[in-house]
């Protein structure tokens, strides 16, 4: 099985068009069709079906596509790592971040890392924790940054703690709920969950840590901006890191609810796969994350 034929299949499935895939790879359409046909003969299975809109993978084609995509990513990562080990800090770094990391560490880390290594292309995707672990497993991201949950498999992942913060309860500025003093008084409020499903999230962890049932779900979000917008403009209750809640820009829209109970402690860190080779770019990125965490602990966030 040749790498070129696998690349032909990947391009065809991603583009959904043989013509577009051929153009992307710099070959003629008949040549690309021949490469895919070679794969089908070798595997004795159909890989693509033609439709009025282009081509789609068969069940067998989808399986091969997913494996071929992973092989392509691994080869690209190997090429970048070899270049970096030779002192040439070039290539691409794919970073998966969860909302809490976007709010706390990522802006400063991207600024300082980008200044030191301008030839490394940074791709940042914001998703929820569960989705980021899936992307980490599949090799779609090189590193995930966010809250480190309890029970994370030490055999599958390696974690590096960066900082500890406290998640505090917030509501829109002027909300009558800002006068509440006990968490139980917010049990019937509409809570914004930052989670991949309706039955998990920081709100649930906060309530359970104080012996209370999880509050109802008002909305489920996977975006920092959406979280701030919903809380700041509606009758929702949310949780966010203390440093962000105190930020001058955020504080103009929301208020911290001074409940008697302690906020939810959260460890924020970097997560990588235990079976992957840690590239120089990833090591340097983690160092810049530590620098950003140190700066965050020394002074309040600057106004935007």
Image (spheres, rainbow, N blue to C red):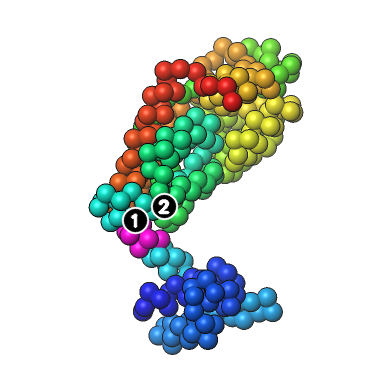
Query: What residue is rendered at 42% in x and 78% in y?
Result: 5
Residue 132 screen position, x and y as percent = 48, 47
Q: Which residues are magenta?
A: 73-80
Residue 24 appears left or right of 161: right
Please say if 256 is above or below 59.
above
Residue 241 screen position, x and y as percent = 53, 25
Please say if 190 is above or below 173.
below
Mark 2 secondary-structure assignment:
strand
Mark 1 secondary-structure assignment:
helix
Residue 288 appears left or right of 34: left
Q: Residue furthest left?
A: 86
Query: What residue is rendered at 57% in x and 40% in y?
Result: 195
| Of residues 146 and 114, the one drawn nearer to the viewer in this rendering | 114
For marks 2 and 1 on the same chain, the one whose residue lies earlier in the sequence:
1
Query: What residue is rendered at 36% in x and 78% in y?
Result: 2
| Of residues 126 and 11, the one drawn nearer to the viewer in this rendering | 11
Please say if 171 is above or below 179.
below
Residue 61 appears left or right of 170: left
Label annotation for residue 92:
2
Circle 2 packing at 10 Å, graded few (<14), some (14-19), many (20+), is some
Query: What residue is rendered at 25% in x and 52% in y?
Result: 86
Residue 145 screen position, x and y as percent = 44, 39
Circle 1 packing at 10 Å, graded few (<14), some (14-19), many (20+), is many
Q: Is residue 78 magenta?
A: yes
C-alpha distance separating marks 2 and 1 = 7 Å
Report which residue position mark 1 lands on: 80
Placement of the N terminus among the 4 image quadrants: bottom left
Please say if 55 is above or below 108.
below
């Amino acid at each position: 099985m040749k790498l070129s034929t696998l690349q032909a299949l990947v391009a065809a499935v991603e583009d959904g068009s043989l013509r577009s895939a051929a153009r992307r790879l710099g070959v003629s359409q008949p040549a690309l069709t021949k490469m895919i046909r070679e794969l089908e003969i070798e595997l004795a299975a159909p890989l693509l079906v033609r439709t009025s809109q282009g081509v789609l993978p068969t069940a067998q084609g989808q399986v091969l596509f997913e494996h071929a995509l992973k092989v392509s990513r691994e080869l690209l990562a190997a090429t970048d790592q070899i270049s970096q080990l030779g002192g040439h800090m070039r290539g691409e770094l794919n970073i998966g971040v969860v909302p809490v990391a976007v709010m706390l560490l990522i802006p400063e880390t991207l600024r300082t890392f980008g200044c030191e290594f301008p030839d490394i292309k940074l791709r940042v995707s914001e998703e929820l924790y569960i989705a980021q672990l899936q992307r980490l497993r599949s090799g779609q991201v090189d590193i995930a940054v966010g809250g480190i949950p309890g029970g994370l498999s030490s055999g599958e992942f390696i974690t590096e703690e960066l900082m500890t913060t406290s998640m505090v309860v917030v509501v829109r500025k002027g909300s009558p709920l800002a006068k509440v003093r006990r968490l139980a008084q917010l049990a019937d409020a509409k809570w914004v969950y930052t989670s991949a499903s309706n039955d998990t999230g920081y709100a649930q962890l906060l309530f359970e840590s104080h012996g209370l049932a999880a509050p109802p779900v008002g909305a489920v979000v996977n975006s920092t901006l959406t979280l701030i917008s919903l809380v700041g403009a509606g009758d929702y209750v949310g949780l966010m890191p203390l440093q962000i809640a105190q930020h001058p820009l955020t504080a103009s829209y929301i208020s911290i609810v001074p409940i008697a109970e302690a906020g939810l402690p959260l460890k924020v860190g970097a997560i990588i796969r235990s079976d992957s080779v840690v590239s120089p770019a990833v090591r340097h990125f983690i160092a810049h994350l530590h620098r950003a965490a140190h700066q965050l602990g020394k002074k309040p966030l600057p106004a935007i």
